[in-house]
Image (cartoon, rainbow, N blue to C red):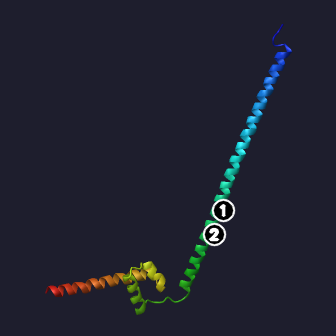
Amino acid sequence: MNVLAHPITILTACALSLAGALLLFFSLKRELARLRAEVAALEEKRAAEAAELRRALRVLAQEVEEERKAALDRAAGPRQSMNLSKRSQALRMHRFGASPEKIAAELGISRREVELLLKVHRTVLETVTGREAAAAGA
């Protein structure tokens, strides 16, 4: 009797083939579920990043708009020059430790004007103290 022609052999081979196909089917199904979960997580991450980028873009747009308005305001009206009162206020604020940026913001003048004023003030002080030292040494 031929073993391959026996009905139990054929049924066993069919059962093993069916079991293998079922195993492949369920492992594929499990892999598909894992990939769907991974894609969903990536989609959530992308959506969160997109929302953060939109928020950052709105903030930048506001900053650009504020800077544009400030530039229009600076260009629109005549600039105030630094009068004696502002000079004395700037020097007083500098003595109390305020930065040139803070001084400029509070007095409504440019930071460069403040830096120039402070530089001229230091030069004058060096000149005056140099003369006093020379007079004291003579």
Query: Where does the image place residue 64, in percent across and percent down from the top left?
Result: 58, 73
Kindly tell me whether residue 110 is visible in this rendering: no
Query: Tag 2: Cα neighbours inside 10 Å, few (<14), some, or many (≥20)?
Result: few
Residue occupying the point 82% across, 16% down: 9
Three-letter residue code for mark 1:
Ala
Query: Tag 1: Cα neighbours inside 10 Å, few (<14), some, or many (≥20)?
Result: few
Q: How many marks?
A: 2
Kindly tell me whether residue 120 is visible in this rendering: yes
Q: Are marks 1 and 2 in contact (CB under 8 Å)?
A: no
Horizontal side of residue 57 vs 7, given as left or right? left
Q: Is residue 32 above or below residue 126?
A: above
Quarter holding residue 46? bottom right
Numbered label attached to residue 30: none
Residue nearer the viewer, 23 or 103: 23
Horizontal side of residue 23 vs 134, given as left or right? right
Query: Where does the image place residue 92, in percent across and percent down from the top left?
Result: 38, 86
Query: Where does the image place residue 106, in percent across and percent down from the top left?
Result: 48, 84
Numbered label attached to residue 58: 2
Q: Secondary structure at mark 2?
A: helix
Query: Where does the image place residue 54, in percent across and percent down from the top left?
Result: 65, 65
User: Which of the image's four quarters has the N terminus?
Assistant: top right
Three-letter residue code for mark 2:
Arg
Residue nearer the viewer, 11 or 103: 11
User: Which of the image's four quarters has the C terminus?
Assistant: bottom left
Residue nearer the viewer, 68 or 109: 109
Quarter holding residue 115? bottom left
Q: Which residue is mark 1?
A: 51
